[in-house]
Image (tube, helix red, strand yellow):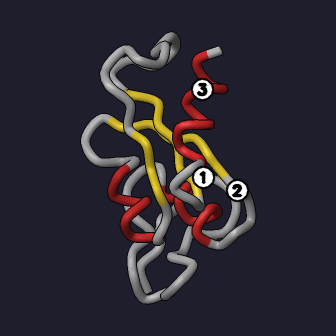
Amino acid sequence: MFVSRCQRGPPTCNPHDVTRSPGGSSSGSGAVVGDFQVPLALGTQTGGSTIRPASYNGVFALKPTWNAISREGLKMCKAGSFCSSLADPRQTQFHVTL
């Protein structure tokens, strides 16, 4: 069984198949959207930590253009979003940039 572990709480599992990985470091965000627990979630990406969990968990992700969303408080990462429908990523980016 592939799981992603954090310091607290249960391990993160792929909501569609617990024998598969939920993705990278933002896998918890991708997994909860993929499991329909929330309609959207935020994540960060340096390498593939937003787009990989989205793909693994069957959801959509938006990795915005560099500096399109403020990176204040984030050292090297880009803020991105996970959504359950194709219309949601643009709405999330709009609300995050306000």
**7 relative position to 18: left or right:** right
Q: Residue at x 42, y 50 (%)?
A: 25
Disc 3 residue type?
Phe
Residue 24: image quadrant is: bottom left
**Percent x, y of residue 98:** 65, 14
Residue at figure coordinates x 33%, y 58% from the top left: 52
Disc 2 designates what residue?
39
Query: The residue under label 2 is which amino acid type?
Result: Pro
Left or right side of 22 for 11: right
Q: Residues within 10 Å of mark 1 (few under 14, many from 20)?
A: few
Instruction: Give the mark nearer the N terminus: 1 vs 2.
Output: 1
Residue indicated by mark 3: 94
Task: Tell me the CA gap for discs 3 and 2.
Answer: 16 Å
N-terminal-most mark, 3 or 1: 1
The N terminus appears in which quarter of the rendering?
bottom left
Mark 1 vs mark 2, foreground winner is: 2
